[in-house]
Amino acid sequence: MNATALDVYRCSKRFRSRKGTAQALQDVTFQVPEGARCGLLGPNGAGKSTLIRILANLLRPDAGQITVLGHPLRWGRHAYKRQVGFMLEDLALMERLTGREQLELAAQLYGLPPDQAAARIESLTRPFEVATALDRWIETYSNGMRRQLAFLLALLHRPRLIVLDEPFEAMDAQAIEAAIDLLHAHNREGATLLISSHRLDKLERLCDYLVVLHRGRVRFAGPIADFCNHLPEADTLEAAYLGWLRAG
């Protein structure tokens, strides 16, 4: 039996404002086995980005227990961070650095020796358009190149767990294909994938496991094949998901 890369137990998060409170997550519980390729689905407002920000230690949950690669998640502590690669909805790139400088800085923070970092940057960026702009300031990048750079930053240090929030947004077809190839390669090397995306055709190519959130709760967690079997007439993940939404 595979070890568990991610164990989320009864995670809850509520946001408060002058207009009242909103329950973003409610008793969210699921596990992702080590080496799995897991898609995270749900309509807008389902709580996907909130959950990913909690995993990245950028938001503090109100309740619950989370274990990442065997390390209990503790607010403000980052024992597991060098083993996880995150791409968040807010890319948070450093606009007045070049793409190369941003990658080199990240490599330094992750403890990669300079020669290894240079080789890794060259091999990672080669299939992407951003490779032609590595010595330009990031503030000059198109949205697509920004997404490519943020994606590559998440993979730079060969993490054991890769967590991506809408990685294919604004990428062109060639970049998407290169990204999918890279993710498959990292998974073959043992990395676990957790990917939130509205591009269901891409998730179906990448993932074998699925977690579906709706109104802050887990509505399904298990193999994609089991989810699709709920609607035998659906021949794609997208058709099964849309049918599931219509069924309420």
Image (spheres, grey):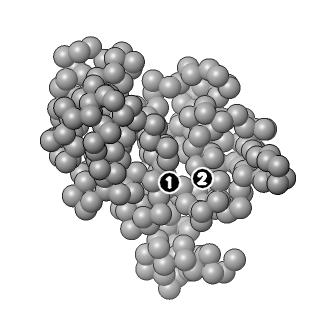
Q: Nearer the viewer, residue 80 or 190?
A: 80
Density class for disc 1 (Cα within 10 Å; few <14, some 14-19, many ≥20) is many
The residue that label 1 is drawn on is: 196
Q: Is residue 74 above or below residue 195?
A: above
Residue at position x 35%, y 47% from top?
147
Residue at position x 72%, y 57% from top?
217
Residue at position x 43%, y 80% from top?
235
Question: In which quarter of the view is residue 53 placed?
Answer: top right
Label 1 with label 2: CB-CB less than 8 Å = yes
Name the image quarter holding the C terminus: bottom right
Q: Is residue 6 visible?
A: yes
Is residue 10 left or right of 188 when viewed as pictured? right
- The amino acid sitting under disc 1 is Ser
Mark identifier at residue 42: none
Q: Secondary structure at mark 2?
A: helix
Number of marks: 2
Where is residue 22 drawn, in percent x and y?
78, 54
Where is residue 174 drawn, in percent x and y?
21, 58
Is residue 117 left or right of 164 when viewed as pictured? left
Is residue 38 left or right of 179 when viewed as pictured? right
Q: CA distance from mark 1 to mark 2?
A: 7 Å
Where is residue 47 drawn, in percent x and y?
65, 53
Q: Nearer the viewer, residue 139 or 195?
A: 139
The residue that label 2 is drawn on is: 48
